[in-house]
Amino acid sequence: MGSSGSKMPVEGTFRTASADGRRIVTWMWSEKPGDPAQLCRERFIVYDLERRRAIGSFETDELHGAIAGSTSSGIALSPNGMTLAVRSGSKLQLIHLP
C-alpha cells in the first residue's frame, strides 16, 4: 500500500533468439521516473538453451542518464549464436561468445 505519488523505476525486457534457435539474449533496462524519465541501467544476459544455463552477462552504461525515448539501443545474435551485437546510441559492440 504505497502512496499514489511514489516514483518506482520503470523496467522493461526484450528477448531475441539466434536463427538456429540454440541461444537467446535477454535485454533488460530500467528508467528513473521523472519529467523527462532517464535511462539508468541496461543489462544483457545470453542463454544457451541446449546447456540450459546463462553463458554471459554484462551491463553497459553508454546511455546512462539519457532521456528515455530520445535514443535507443539494439541487440542481435549472429545466426549461429556465437556473436552478440549491441548498439547503444552511436556505439556498436561485437561480443564473441563461448
Image (tube, helix red, strand yellow):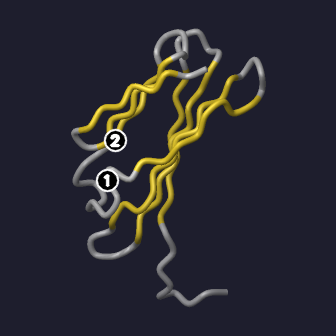
Kind of residue indicated by mark 1 = Leu
| Disc 1 to disc 2: CB gap under 8 Å | yes
In what quadrant of the picture does the N terminus appear? bottom right
Element on which disc 1 rests: loop
Left-right relation of 71 to 21: left
Crowding at label 2, few (<14), some or many (≥20) Cα neighbours within 10 Å? some
Crowding at label 1, few (<14), some or many (≥20) Cα neighbours within 10 Å? many
- Work out whether residue 43 or residue 30 is closer to the camera in this orientation and state it: 43
Element on which disc 2 rests: strand
Position above or below: 16 against 79: below
Disc 1 versus disc 2: nearer the observer? 1
Which label was assigned to residue 15? none
Kind of residue indicated by mark 2 = Ser
**Corner quadrant of residue 70:** bottom left
Q: Residue at x 56, y 90 (%)?
A: 3
* Residue labelled with disc 1: 63
State the image coordinates of residue 18 (x, y, percent, origin top left).
Answer: 54, 17
State the image coordinates of residue 66 (x, y, percent, origin top left).
Answer: 27, 60
- Work out whether residue 37 or residue 96 is closer to the camera in this orientation and state it: 96
* Residue labelled with disc 2: 73
Q: Earlier in the sequence, mark 1 or mark 2?
A: 1
